[in-house]
Image (cartoon, grey):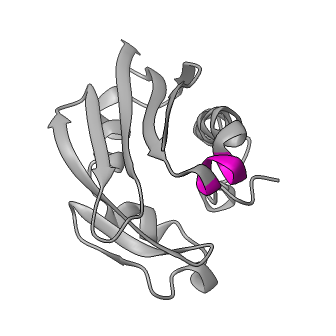
Amino acid sequence: MGSSKIKGKAVAISVPAHALYTAFADMRHFVERLPEEKKQGITATSDTIEGEVQGLRMGAAISERIPFSCIKIKEHGQTPFQFEVSLFFDAADVQKTMFHMEVDAELPFMVKMLIGNKLQEMVDKITEQLALASEGKISPEDLKMDPFNMA
């Protein structure tokens, strides 16, 4: 196992911090945004989400909520490796939030070989897409959150 620590770049999101935080504070919101064909086999509650990704059973659970400033998400269920994703919301003004993600994962060798060098790219792509969606440059339905298909 190898530890991977990624700090994503900060982006300005044209949404108030409380609204952006609220969108991420309930795991069911992630499922709502998925295309219909991707929803099969995915279950979510306000605190957890589970499903299959590239043949691996994966799950995540919100482990900490600091209202309007931070959400921490950890592995859940039968997930084959440990990880923590921290989402940071910093109100720049009433209509703008500086947002960034940090990922800390203990990846098995094979998983690290598959995605280890793409983690930074994946984190940055997700934050860039959120910023574009907040500016109306892409629709929320077009957000590509599949870490293995970020084209």
Look at the image and say whether residue 58 sits in the magenta stretch. Answer: no
Look at the image and say whether residue 111 sits in the magenta stretch. Answer: yes
Task: Residue at 56%, 25% (x, y): give it.
Answer: 8
Task: Residue at 62%, 47% (x, y): give it.
Answer: 112
Residue 94 drawn above or below residue 87:
above
Q: Which SS does the magenta portion mostly show?
A: helix
Residue 57 drawn above or below residue 116:
below
Residue 7 x, y percent position in the rendering: 52, 22
Write down the quadrant of residue 27 in the picture.
Answer: bottom left
Residues shaded magenta: 110-115
Residue 134 x, y percent position in the rendering: 58, 37
Residue 104 drawn above or below residue 48:
above
Residue closest to the far right:
151
The answer to whether one can see residue 84 in this image is yes
Task: Residue at 58%, 83% (x, y): give it.
Answer: 36
Residue 18 x, y percent position in the rendering: 28, 33
